[in-house]
Structures are given as structure tokens and as C-alpha cells.
Amino acid sequence: MPYYLNQTVEICGVHRKLNNSRALRISAAAAEEFAKRGFAGARIERIAAAARVNKQLLFYYFHSKRGLFQTVLKRGVGELEVALAAIPSGSGRPLQRLQEVLAALFEFLERHPQLVSLISHAERLDAAPFAAPIRRLVVLLAEGQGLGLVRDDLDPHVAAAQALVLMLGYLRLEPIIAASAPPLAADEPALRERWRRAAVDLVVNGVRAPGV
């Protein structure tokens, strides 16, 4: 089921009234419109028509165009958090868990290209969509530093943000990246999987303490 049709009540703070059928139709139409045209290019009239509601109902539920965008984004990021929280913590060491979280993050974003597009259009006032995933990575990196497994000179917040950019940026720019390097374009069908593995390895090995 697409992330924006998830009917879980109170997912990531989304109010109960936004999970009825009409509000969900609006969310689905808005996700498509915002992902395709960005916030500035999206039109409330098109969203309302696609959702088969009038504009007044849209404003009743979401108050404004910005409120609608933020709600749609919050739903997607909420489902991302649910997916990351479902990764068994087990007894794995921080670097192993970091590897698992990064792989799961990439795979989720790969399955939800609309969310990738929505995040790329987000602004500072849109509730910091990647705050929770960054915190999750920061905790793992800090835990690794405490155990001597992660470099002491590393800033966990910078490293976590860089890891996200490696994945989100690739998924947003995949055609351009493939077209810019002939060896990559020649292997384009398998490029995404190669990138995922290489990006995860780059981050994990880049943060690893010497001798670990």
C-alpha cells in the first residue's frame, strides 16, 4: 500500500480526522501533485479535482497548501520511521546495526520515489523531515565511539547527514549520474543495487576506527 494511504491512526502525529476516506483521497492526490510539480508548482485546484472534493473541504482538513504538504510529508516520514524501528536490534554491534539501518533506509526510499521527491521539495519550516532518521544514525555512531569501534574524530551528526545525502541524492539524480559516466550507464539496470552496497560500505568503513 502506498505510504500516503496508510490508515494507521495518529501515525507520526497525524490527527485522527485526517485518516477518513476523503482526507486520504486528498493526501494521495496531493502526494502526486507535489511530487510531480514541487510545492511552488502544485495547484490546490488540481488536487481537489483529482480527489473529487471541493477546495473548501481541503482547507477544512489541512488549513492551507503548506499544511497539506507538511501532512503528506509527515505521513511518508512516519512510515519510514516505522520501517526503521522494525529492524531487530538483537545483539548486533553498532557497526553491524548501522549497516542494517542504512540498507533499510535506502530500500525504503527506493520503494517510495514520491517520498524522495517530496523530501527534495521540503524547506526548513516543513518539520525537518529527516530529523528522526538522523537521530537514529547518530545514536549508533555515538554508541560505536563509546565502544572504540567508531573514529573519535568523527562528528556523528555530520556523518549521519552525509550518509543520507549519499542515498537520497542518488535516488533523486540517478538518470543524470548514469548519463554522466559511461561505465555506469553501461550497467544501468544493476546500478542502483551497486550504489546501495557501495554507499553502505563507504559509510561503515569510513566511520570505522583504525584497527577495528
Image (cartoon, rainbow, N blue to C red):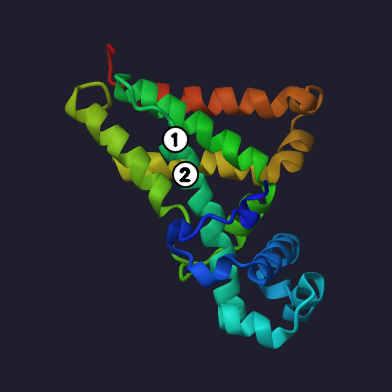
Report the number of discs. 2
Give, as a three-letter code, the residue at label 2: Val
Tell me the quadrant of the picture where the C terminus can be found.
top left
**Labels 2 and 1 touching (C-beta < 8 A):** yes
When asked about the image quadrant of residue 31, the answer is bottom right
From this view, report whether residue 15 is shown above or below residue 194.
Answer: below
- The answer to which quarter of the image holds residue 139 is top left
| Lateral position of residue 55 relative to residue 84, left or right | right
Give the residue pinned by disc 2.
Answer: 82
Measured from the top left, where is residue 84 in percent x and y? 45, 38
Residue 151 at what x, y percent from top left?
Answer: 26, 27
> In front here: 73 or 82?
82
Residue at 49 percent across and 39 percent down: it is 83
In the rendered view, tell whether residue 4 sits above or below residue 14.
above
**Relative side of 177 to 86, left or right:** right
Specify whether residue 154 is in view: no
- Callout 1 environment at 10 Å: few (<14), some (14 to 19), or many (20+)? few
Q: Which mark is residue 86?
A: 1
